Image (cartoon, rainbow, N blue to C red):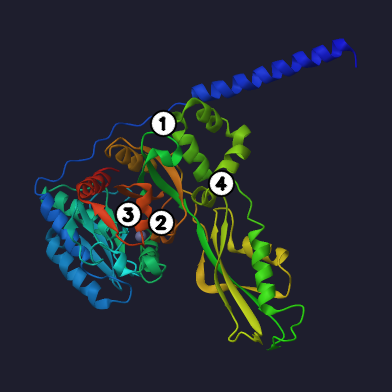
Amino acid sequence: MSGRLLARLGVLFVLLLAGLLAVMVSRTLLLAPQERKAVALPALAESSDEPAMVARLSRAITFPTLTGNDAAFDDFHAFLRDAFPLVHASLSLKIFGHSLLFHWDSGQGCKPTLLLAHQDVVPVSSPEDWRYPPFSGVNEEGYIWGRGAMDDKVSVMAILEAVEGMLAADQQPPCDVWLAFGHDEETGGVHGAARMAAWLLSQGLQFELVLDEGGMVLPGSTLGISAPVALIGIAEKGYLSVVLRAHGEPGHSSRPPAKTAVGQVAAAIQTLQSHPRPASLGMPVRQMLEQVAPWQPFAKRMVFANLWLFEPLVLQQLASKPETNALIRTTQAPTMLNAGVKDNVLPATAEAVVNFRLLPGESRDSILGWLEAILPSDVQVTVKDGFFAEASSISPAHSAAFERVAGLAAALPDEPVPAPFLMIAGSDARHYQALSENVLRFLPVSLQQEDIARFHGPNERLARDQYALMVRFYAGVLQSK
Ligand SMILES: [Zn+2]
């Protein structure tokens, strides 16, 4: 090659590089924060007495509404009738088991709003780890303590407080409002949410917005920015538990065959763990990164503004921590093993349970097909009965309904930056997918990263000063359309 040609190629390369850099920088500079109408949270209704509201929340926590405890639900409902007389006088109520479906007729024909929350709570596995008894509802150290203070009886109560306050002030919602309070969310929602959703569908109803628990306000450091982030779930992952089963020659362990049931199951688990499902930046996560990008320092902003180029780098970064790895791929976790009765007897069968959390875009069939391809044919794969839900559909992050929730979330203290979010846990919301294009998942509370462990864990609690904000947030949802 002649020197002149080389020089020309060199110039061309430099020009290309400069062009690429110009595209990257201009995309970065053009990246502006999402324009958002300034919204203020409505003030508490004049009739609302904050200490009385907090006392009602404390009381609500004292009912151990665990799935199956019928008496606790009956007592809780009697308490609700007492605590919210206007709600019970003005809204119609339909009961499904212990689930409550309220309808607030606005007299207007516009598309209604549906607010979801669940009355049931999870059991307590280690009461000795609790600072205060889990069903005491005590108000100490600036917190209300107990099961349901975050997940999610608190929303049942805050929503009812907001409605009661509006009724006391003679305020009507601009469009009809429905409230669906399930009683078995923690065990799948089959007897509560699923039945209420089927009934609403049978009435031909469609909702402008369905809002359930889900994301929350977390420190911005979660996503590398300084302002807090309000994570609004637009989708949730699916759930699939499979049983891997292998058979072997039973007999004495003093003359074992080359292949054993236990060995085959162990090898199958090893195969799965060394083949993670592929990583990808699905829509909810991509939109989350893009929404917070304008708040990132320049270098990171350039990366997120140019995901077309940097996606592999971003995926590598997200894959390095379990909590972000779960956002970019279907995860698989071996959770149960079962084989053998005696140390010197070869078992005839061995079993393992592997729990998958499906990314939107994957399905039961895609996972079962992959398992069939990757595992030897003498390992049987079956779906564990009743332990399956497909990933949800994805609600749009650019919609009036999203803005309605995002605007109110941005009005919470410290002006959180709202961002779409993929929920890795399940919620009742998935049962309501057919009822709205806009199924969103957001709990209007501000937490620290370490508080996440209190969900289903010990010392579940709500900061007392957050409760009135929750009520005001829900009032804002009820008063908008
Ligand atoms: Zn919950």
Q: Residue 114: which numbered mark, if any? A: 3
Disc 1 designates what residue? Answer: 34
Is disc 2 surrounded by few (<14), some (14 to 19) or many (20+) residues within 10 Å?
Answer: many
Q: State if disc 3 and disc 2 touch (CB < 8 Å).
A: yes
- Local secondary structure at mark 3: strand
Please name the amino acid that badge 1 sits on: Gln
Residue denoted by label 2: 435
Q: CA distance from mark 2 to mark 3?
A: 9 Å
> Residue at horizontal 30%, vertical 48%?
445
Which residue is painted at 47% across and 40% down in the image? 288
Question: Which residue in the structure is indicated by mark 4?
Answer: 320
Q: Earlier in the sequence, mark 2 or mark 3?
A: 3
**Cβ–Cβ under 8 Å for marks 4 and 1:** no
- SS assignment at label 4: loop
Vertically, is 291 above or below 80? above
How far apart are the two marked residues, 4 and 2, measured between alpha carbons?
37 Å
- Distance, label 4 to label 3, CA atoms, is 38 Å
- Residue lying furthest front: 254
Which three-letter amino acid code belongs to the residue tagged 3? Leu
Q: What residue is at 38 percent from the left and 66 percent from the top?
A: 186
Specify whether 59 is left or right of 186: left
- Between discs 4 and 2, the one toward the N terminus: 4
Q: Which amino acid type is shown beneath numbered disc 4?
A: Ser
Q: Residue 354: image x %, image y %? A: 57, 67
